[in-house]
Amino acid sequence: MSAFALAWRNLVRQKRRSFLMIAVVTFGFASFALAGGFIAQSFEALKEGTIRSVGHLQILDRRAVGKAEDSTLEYGIPEAARARALVAKDPDVAAVLPRIDFVGLATNGAKSVPFLGVGVDPDPEAAATLAPELVVSGRYLSGDGGDGIVLGTGLAAALGVKPGDRVTLLATTPDGSLNAVDGIVEGLVDVRIKELNDRYLAGGIGLVSRLLQSSETVSKLVVFLKPGANEEKAAERLAAALTAAGFPIAVQRWQELAVFYGQVRLLYIGIFGFVGTVLVVIVILSAAIVMTMAVTERTREIGTLRALGTRPSGVLRMFLAEGIVIAIAGCVAGMLLALVIRAGLNASGLMLPPPPGATHGMPINVKLYPLAYAAGLAAMILTMGIASFIPARRASRIAIVDALTHV
Amino acid sequence: MSTHSGAPLIEAVNVSRSYALGAARVPAVRDVTFSIGAGEFVALQGPSGSGKTTLLNLLGLLDRPDEGTVRLEGRDGESLTENERSDLRRDRFGFVFQTFNLIPVLTAEENVAYPLALAGVEARQRRVRARELLASVGLPEKAAVRPDLLSGGQRQRVAIARALANRPAVVFADEPTANLDSHTAEEILDLMREINASAKVAFLFATHDPIVVERARRVVKLHDGAIASDERV
């Protein structure tokens, strides 16, 4: 009879204790799998949101890297159409979005409010970056945008305007003079971050170029790649092609642009690591207590096995096998429990409260993340192995005559 | 003191063993020299505390002496590693205990087969041998029964079958009849005598049961950890 078969019979013999221990492992594993799935889902949503906002790659003037402009379009990319066409030729590129970043004042005639503006090419911009649920009133820009603008809901509230209303935009041109144009509010968007919502304004490249009295110059080109494309290689290719064409540009990847993504990820990993450690310690302590009880209760049996010729390593293996059988049984039950809880949570529609600075909460969505299940299995087997080892080693070292007379 | 003729199977030479009792050490066996030969049927007799179980444990390589040495077929037991001693017990010794000491989660057949599994005997051969042994102790129909469903006498028969599994040279039996009624005790002793006669397996008992002493061919009396007498019957 193998050590595992003997271990299984001993576990069946001690039903209540085994059930308790398997339950501890079950909840431990389910916690690993669910927390891992939730965090993976959160990372994915965060990554998706980040890329939707900043693109996979951004192309900008080398001088603009890490620097703020003293005046609008100081470090712009001239001949934007030519650069855009060059980038669009790359086989991995799905979309190239020109953007002009600028600041100014929006006025309704009675009240002026500062805004953070972005000039966009409306149709490709909407296709690549716009989540339909962000438009809360009216519609997004289309075609070349004409005189249309969209405002963040906070900015619109501050100005007291709604779709169809006219707003005058004032901004400083690259040569330092002040200019104004009229825009028509096409729609209101909720960009999910309160501070940005209070300042957000978007208009077509044509309107923004008229306001800034610039033509053919953009702040950056935002690049979206096709699924599965290698970002690093695409960045290298684009940098080489544009440099060869006379553009003194730099290509930045989304990870460099979205520092908060890395910070949030580290924070989540830290929280998960801490909770995971606590979980593992609880399982280790519970298992060690249970295994110590098992060794104590079966001391005479250990003496018998040793008298019959079982080597100390055989006794060690027997108790380790019990720990591992508990871990496997607990993980199988934990997997089923995690799947049931996951299905329940995903169907519940429960929302998490908005994170600081955000205007909307996030629906609870737990991904089926095989790596979390594998990590849970490995952690529980390792944990049970560690928890069983000390009592098992003690069992293997008990003096035979003491064990045989143990009461 | 060795009173039998021929090469000794197991030999204790000037062995002493004491145990800690608080700060003091209590001697259990004192400077004993003793041996048994192949096929003997020997009873170690004495009152409680006379050292018979301690001597049995030392001879069975379950314990190590403080002084002196135990030899099995000329091999010095004290120079062996724990694994080598385990292997020797598995291959050359059988043990029968007062409280039967069967593994509760195993059936009678699996209990008998356990030492065979330790010795690496293939599963089918283990089953055949275990059934043979159960038949030889009169329990062929109890192969699939767990120990808790057997009577005391039946459990001890299973324990005897288990002790014989690897065809040992000697079976050590520590008070094997203490938990049995006198009728069952006599049956068990008769069974052991039969095995002793047919399989030439030596038996060494630690006992104060007269039923055992009556059947022994050699009686060694212990007193205060030393051999008081050693007589062939």
Image: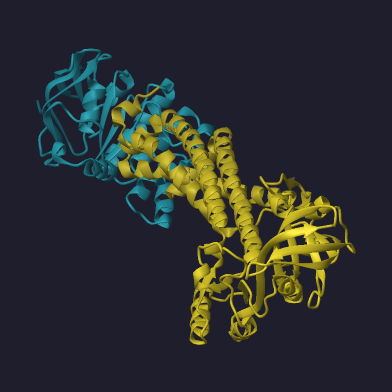
Chain colours: A yellow, B cyan
Above or below residue A348? Residue A296 is above
Total numbered labels: 0
Taking depth in this image into account, of A358 and B188 the one nearest to the observer is A358
Residue at image coords 60%, 80%: A78
The residue lying furthest to the right in this view is A164
Above or below residue A405? Residue B121 is below
The quadrant of the picture occupied by the N terminus of chain B is top left
Taking depth in this image into account, of A152 and B21 the one nearest to the observer is A152
Left or right placement of residue A379 versus residue B210 in this view: right
Above or below residue B207? Residue A284 is below
Q: Position of residue A333 (x, y in %)?
A: 61, 47
The quadrant of the picture occupied by the C terminus of chain B is top left
Residue at image coords 38%, 45%: A317
Location of residue B203 by image quarter: top left
Left or right placement of residue B95 versus residue A163 in this view: left
Residue at image coords 19%, 42%: B81
Left or right placement of residue A338 versus residue A274 in this view: right
Left or right placement of residue B143 versus residue B193 in this view: right
Location of residue A225 by image quarter: bottom right
Residue B9 in view, yes or no:
no
The residue lying furthest to the front in this view is A177
Taking depth in this image into account, of A204 and A281 the one nearest to the observer is A204
Q: Position of residue B26 (x, y in %)?
A: 20, 14
Residue at image coords 81%, 63%: A168
Residue B117 in view, yes or no:
yes
Q: Position of residue B169 (x, y in %)?
A: 24, 42
Q: Position of residue A12 (x, y in %)?
A: 55, 40
